[in-house]
Every structure is written in structure tokens, then in C-alpha cells.
Image (spheres, rainbow, N blue to C red):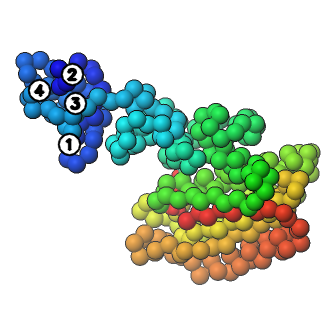
Amino acid sequence: MDNFFTEGCRVWLWEGDQYWPSTVDSCSGGVVVFRTDFGQVYTYKQNALSRQRVYEMHSNSVHGVEDMAALQDLHEGAILHNLHLRYTQHSIYTYIGSILAAVNPYQCIPEMYDVSAVERYSRHHLGEIPPHIYAIANECYRSLWKRSNNQCVLISGESGAGKTESTKVILRFLSLMSQQSLELSAKDRSSHVEEALLESSPIMEAFGNAKTVYNNNSSRFGKFIQLHFSQRGNIQGGKIVDCILNNFHTDTADRSMLPLLPLVLSVLCVSVCVCACVCMSLHRVQFYCH
Ligand SMILES: Nc1ncnc2c1ncn2[C@@H]1O[C@H](COP(=O)(O)OP(=O)(O)OP(=O)(O)O)[C@@H](O)[C@H]1O
């Protein structure tokens, strides 16, 4: 019988215009009781159930997948459920083919971004080991030579999603790869352009960020970051350009530092543009973070 469900069976239940991940509470006497993962309980007559109303969850939705291109249940509920399932296991990154979805953990996850993670991801191709933003950064870095072309990373999401943090994580990866390519000693590393790039973040944030209702440290403008790499693989220069001033009226931001913003941005742009001009870089990596 198609509409008989065993107790404890995982199903997708169509209610209120969407599929909910649910469990069969009981199925007896011609009545089936479902409980959604969010606590709502729905009771149906067994003979009134259709496959459109309820159907069994595929095992890869039950256990979760690293790449959502592999999901057999294809609807919004399945995508959100997979992200949530992985999030509860501290796996904040999930692939959608070659795209990476990141869920903001709002906490430090130990060892997620340490040097050993950089080394691990720098030695593997995309998809070989669990999803990570370092894998995207590594793919981008390697593709400069593999495809012999400029590379671009687009980071997008709503306010507070983690775009700025993700940008910093990618910059950190690229900066470590750059330093490794030169085989510099720890002492020599401090004076290089990689350090300048990483250290520009707190300055940009001090003048260009503000508290909003969505994010305590919200960027008030988008950033276009360009890095120039030499054939050896080290960063020779770069520039950060502000773009898209975010809407202050809707975000209720603190605007006290705003008048200083153009000044600071122009100083930063000048200093990094000079580096970009003097170097004979071969390829570029561009970030667009809004
Ligand atoms: N990978 C992460 N690990 C830990 N905490 C994170 C991570 N990403 C974001 N956060 C937390 O979330 C906060 C908001 O992130 P972030 O400022 O990057 O968002 P955003 O998308 O740039 O927002 P906006 O568009 O408003 O500037 C950070 O201050 C940090 O506390």
C-alpha cells in the first residue's frame, strides 16, 4: 500500500505551500500522524494522503550531502534542511557544484582556519575533501596557472551573512600561499604586501563599518579587491575600490564617521595602486564583495 508509513519514517510533508522535514509519529486505524522537525503535528486520514501531500525522504536528505547537486529531493525545503543538518554538525560550508554556500556560525569553530587547514586544502582539488572556503581560494589560486587567466570570486549574501569575514579568510589563504611561494623566513614575511593587505581590513572597518539592526559590524559599502600575482605565485600588489554605498535609511546606521570615509578610502587606494603600478604582474584575482 503506497500510503502506509512505518513509525519513525522520515518524510516530506507539504503544508502551507512548502515541504517540511517530518517524522511519522504513528500510522494505525486508518490515521497517520506526522510531526515536523519544528514541532507542528498534523493528522491525516490514511486514504486521503497523496504523493503530492507526503512522500518518503531520500536517504541523502536524511543524512545530508556535501554537495547539494547530489540531492535527490529537489525543492527549497530539502536545500534548507541540508544546510541546517550540516550546520548542527559544525559543517558550515556546503557545495552546490562549484559554488560554495556558507552558513554564518556566529562563533569561532576551532581549527577551521588554522595553518594546517591551509596546508591541507592547498594540496587537494575542489571536492576531494569536505567543503571549505579554502578549497575555493585554492581553486582560484591554482586556476591562475591552470587556465592561464584572471580569476574572480563573487561573495554575496544578505547583511550579516558573513561576506566580510569570508573575504578576510580568502585573503589570508592567498597571502599564506604567496608567502610560501617565495619561501620566506617568518622574519621577512612581516614587511610584505600580504601583511599590508590583511592589516588594511581593520582600518577599512574602523571607518567604513557601522552598527545596524542586522549586523553590529556592517560594511557600509561594497568592496572590489584586486590582487596582482607574479608568475612565481606571490602577491605583488593590489587595490581595494569601494562601490555601492549601502542604504543608510533602512539600516539605521551610526553615521558619525561617514564624513571621513572618502579621505580614508582615497589614502588606501593611492597606497595600494602604487604597488600595483610598479609590479609587472601577470595575472589578477578579483573579489567583489557587496
Ligand atoms: N566564518 C565565520 N566564523 C565565525 N563568525 C563569523 C563568520 N562569518 C561571520 N561571522 C560573524 O558574523 C558577523 C557578521 O559577519 P560579516 O560582517 O562578515 O557580515 P557581512 O555579510 O559582511 O555583513 P554586511 O553586509 O552587513 O557588511 C561577524 O562580525 C562575525 O561575528
Lower sequence index among marks 2 and 4: 2
Q: CA distance from mark 3 to mark 1?
A: 12 Å
Q: From this viewpoint, is residue 268 visible?
A: yes
Identified by mark 1, the residue type is: Glu
In the rendered structure, the answer to whether residue 64 lies left or right of residue 222 reads left
Q: CA distance from mark 2 to mark 4?
A: 9 Å
Question: In the displayed image of the protein, which residue is found farthest to the front?
Answer: 1
Lower sequence index among marks 3 and 1: 1
Q: Which labelled disc corresponds to residue 15? A: 1
Q: Secondary structure at mark 2?
A: loop
Q: Is residue 193 above or below residue 115?
A: below
Q: Which residue is mark 2?
A: 5
* 82 vs 109, nearest the viewer: 82
Lower sequence index among marks 3 and 4: 3
Q: Which residue is mark 4?
A: 46
Q: From this viewpoint, is residue 88 visible?
A: no
The C terminus: image quadrant: bottom right
